[in-house]
Amino acid sequence: GLTDQVFRNLCRKFGAALAISEMNTADTRLWNSRKSQTRLHLAGENGLKIIQIAGSDPAMLAEATAGAEQLGADIIDINMGCPAKKVCRKLSGSALLRDEGLVKEILSSVVAATRLPVTLKMRTGWDPDNRNGVKIATIAEAAGIKALSVHGRTRACMFKGDVEFETIRNIKQTVSIPVIANGDIDSVQTARKVLKLTQADAVMIGRGA
């Protein structure tokens, strides 16, 4: 309900390098709905066109990836960060972080289904007792993911508590692909602080926008 095309174009006008579509279901059978048609609309996009998909079935995600490429996407982004109950109940979003084997299968299937760069949005783990963000990042790099956006909280933390900038830094030190830091970035000062703390390649602004 935020990153529609009008808003994405405004963000780019004010200097954003990338602006990602709203999350789309990997079930392409639902893409003919009015909501999906609006979210997948790319005509008039004034920058790199990034379609984000979410799901738990590797074959379905691969099919959605091919569909997004046909629609004119330049980059495919996989959502493994959404903490919403309705998403996690379907084992999508951040719920996937509990199954590293499935994560590997999904990422490999999606990368193999397209010639486009594939990126991943993730969290630091499922809960504070299961922070496996570094492991997920290494799996992603090995699967061919081109960049990681890391929200510095676990799924259980939702949007509360301090952001784990140290975990983002550890991920950055572990992988060689670009790492984008995310979480509570709502000012220029905070952005500078986060970049210094994490040594990340960029920052992603979410709710702060």
Image: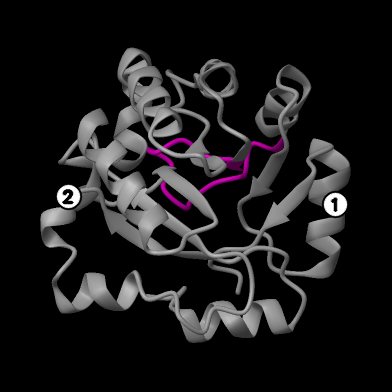
Query: Which numbered circle lies on residue 193?
Result: 1
Toward the viewer: 72 or 64? 72
Most common secondary structure along the magenta stretch: loop
- The kind of residue tagged 1 is Lys
What stretch of residues is rendered in magenta? 149-165
Instruction: Give the answer, above or below, for where 109 lies relative to 60.
Output: above
Separation of residues labelled 2 and 1 (CA atoms): 39 Å
Instruction: Give the answer, above or below, for where 3 lies relative to 63.
Output: below
Query: Which numbered circle lies on residue 130?
Result: none
Secondary structure beneath label 1: helix
Instruction: Give the answer, above or below, for where 67 lies relative to 140.
Output: below
Q: Is residue 57 visible in the rendered structure shown here?
A: no
Q: Determine crowd level at label 1: few under 14, some 14-19, many 20+ residues with C-alpha closer than 10 A.
A: some
Which quadrant of the structure image shows residue 177?
top right
* Residue on which the image places disc 2: 27
Q: Is residue 33 visible in the rendered structure shown here?
A: yes
- The kind of residue tagged 2 is Asp
In this image, 127 relative to 36: left or right?
right
> Reading the chain from its start, which is encountered first: label 2 or label 1?
2
Residue shown at the point (32%, 29%) measured from the top left: 96
Asked if residue 157 lies in the magenta stretch, the reply is yes
Give how far across and how far down residue 37 sits, in percent. 25, 74
Secondary structure beneath label 2: loop
In this image, 173 relative to 45: left or right?
right
Q: Determine crowd level at label 2: few under 14, some 14-19, many 20+ residues with C-alpha closer than 10 A.
A: some
Residue shown at the point (47%, 80%) measured from the top left: 5
Residue shown at the point (72%, 17%) measured from the top left: 174
